[in-house]
Image: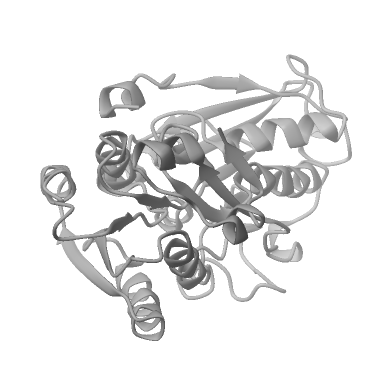
Amino acid sequence: MTRLQLHLLIIGLVLTVTGPIGSGVEAQSARPAKIGVLSESWGPTSRIVGLRDGLQKLGYREDKDFTIGVRFTQGNPAELPAAARDLVRLRPDLIVADETGNTTKAAQMATTRIPIVFMGGSDPVGMGLVKSFAHPAGNITGIADLDVEIGPKRMELFREMLPGLKRILFVYDASNTHADTILRVHRDAERRLGLRLVERAVRTQEEAQAAIAGAQKAEVDGILSSRLHSLNIPGFILEVGAKGTIPTMFHSAFYVERGGLASYAADQAGLGRQAARLVDKILKGAKPADLPVEQPTKFELVINLKTAKALGLTIPQSVLQRADQVIE
């Protein structure tokens, strides 16, 4: 998928979901309860789809009692605060922050009154989003994806798939609040695994595109994507991977389904389904402060064999046998 195609992904999507009525928000008025979703992505993510599916599995029906309106910032973190304020002005009963800590931070800055549920983010305590996992306090709770913590495992799997892997291109948004933590974890893994990160700090989409598009097989053996959507870094990596020259490892199966080589991460749709249970409780009267932050229940390794073949790679059977999904 090209960057243009990513931009054409249903910008401004409005999903409608409905559900069983309890004693909370929905009992106070006959109108549909409004759920606003804030996302740094270009269109509906697996987490947003999982949220909708999770509500349906809880007995919620579409086009009856609930609406979900989504605001996308298309990889631009600078637009998150304004998008969050826009959601607040619509007076939703609940806001769901899709994936990044920056997204949840923007929602937190926009309101201390409206309940917020986040889907993803590795360090909600360190970012000041919640007091603790067990006792969030305030108006925020959610599902932590532990993505930074599993970064070393992602690198280890990448090395197992590519026995000759030594140099990994790692392009990151230097302006992101998570950058220092992400770098520290990956540098520790770099030393332990005997790999070398070819780091490229960027601050604009133009810099990100140039750093990734300019990657040469003679200089790097693979490209590693972090989960951050900012500056369209994963999208640019996908474009390079589609050329069939350099292997890519992603943070989401979304990119592997579109031509990336592999991914290892928490089940993204599963995060959405977990979040749906928290949303359900809040709409029935529970307070976010009383709902502990949850962690993923499943992690997935996804491998695209069509991409491996195009790259001239043979993935070891020991790795294929551990894959949760193999695309052929």
Where residue 301 sits: x, y (%)? 59, 53
All told, the count of numbered labels is 0
Snapshot quadrant of residue 67: top right
Q: Nearer the viewer, residue 274 or 30?
A: 274
Snapshot quadrant of residue 258: top left
Q: Nearer the viewer, residue 177 or 223?
A: 223
Is 111 left, or right, of 273 in this rendering? left
* Residue lying at 47% horizontally and 48% vertically, measured from the top left: 262
Query: Can you see residue 234?
Result: yes
Is 164 left, or right, of 31 in this rendering? left
* Residue lying at 88% horizontally and 40% vertically, measured from the top left: 23
Q: Identify whether 7 is placed above or below 103.
A: above
* Residue lying at 32% horizontally and 76% vertically, measured from the top left: 195
Q: Identify whether 308 is placed above or below 323.
A: above
* Way the structure is coloured: one colour
Query: Can you see residue 139?
Result: no
Is 293 left, or right, of 116 in this rendering? right
The quarter of the image holding the C terminus is top right
Where residue 74 sits: x, y (%)? 33, 34
Where residue 25 sits: x, y (%)? 76, 38
The quarter of the image holding the N terminus is top left
Where residue 175 sits: x, y (%)? 22, 61
